[in-house]
Image (cartoon, rainbow, N blue to C red):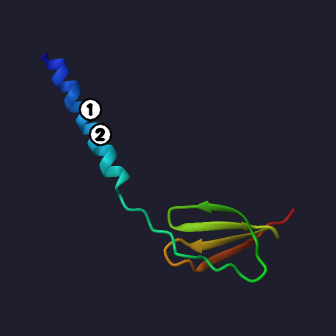
């Protein structure tokens, strides 16, 4: 084997190791369920690092804590 081959194989092993370690890093888990306020229908959902945003059909954005599922903030969308 040449030196270049050994270096390339070593580099490949390092890259694969870093990918495996990074992909196994624990993210904040999702709550088992999120209780929407009465009469609210979800239209879209967006996940952030520590929050979940639900856009409702009545033009509101509801921000929930990702770990506990508690409502953090409610924003009314105006046209």
* Residue underneath mark 2: 16
Placement of 1 over or under 9, stated as above or below: above
Marks 1/2: CA distance? Answer: 6 Å
- Label 2 sits on a secondary structure element that is helix
Residue 8 screen position, x and y as percent: 23, 25
Q: Secondary structure at mark 1?
A: helix
**Numbered-mark total:** 2
Q: Quadrant of residue 1?
A: top left
Q: Residue at x 34, y 44 (%)?
A: 19
Image location (x, y in percent) of residue 52: 59, 67
20 vs 64, left or right, is: left
Q: Identify the residue shown where x is 29% and y is 39%.
A: 16
In the rendered view, does 3 fall on the left or right side of 44?
left
Mark 1 Cα within 10 Å, few/some/many (few <14, many 20+)? few
Question: Residue placed farthest to the right in the image?
Answer: 79
Apparent side of residue 72 relative to residue 9 in the rendered image (left or right): right
Q: Position of residue 10 (x, y in %)?
A: 19, 31
Q: Which residue is mark 1?
A: 12
Give the answer, above or below, for where 27 lies relative to 12: below
What crowding class fits label 2: few (fewer than 14 Cα within 10 Å), some (14-19), or many (20 or more)? few
Residue ID at (57%, 61%):
47
Please report contact status of discs 1 and 2: CB closer than 8 Å, yes or no.
yes
């Amino acid at each position: 084997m040449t030196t270049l081959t050994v270096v390339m194989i070593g580099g490949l092993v390092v890259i694969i190791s870093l990918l495996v370690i990074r992909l196994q890093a624990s993210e904040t888990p999702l709550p088992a369920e999120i209780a929407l306020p009465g009469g609210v229908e979800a239209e879209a959902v967006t996940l952030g690092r520590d929050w979940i945003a639900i856009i409702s059909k009545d033009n509101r954005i509801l921000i929930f804590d990702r770990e506990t599922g508690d409502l953090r903030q409610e924003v009314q969308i105006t046209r």
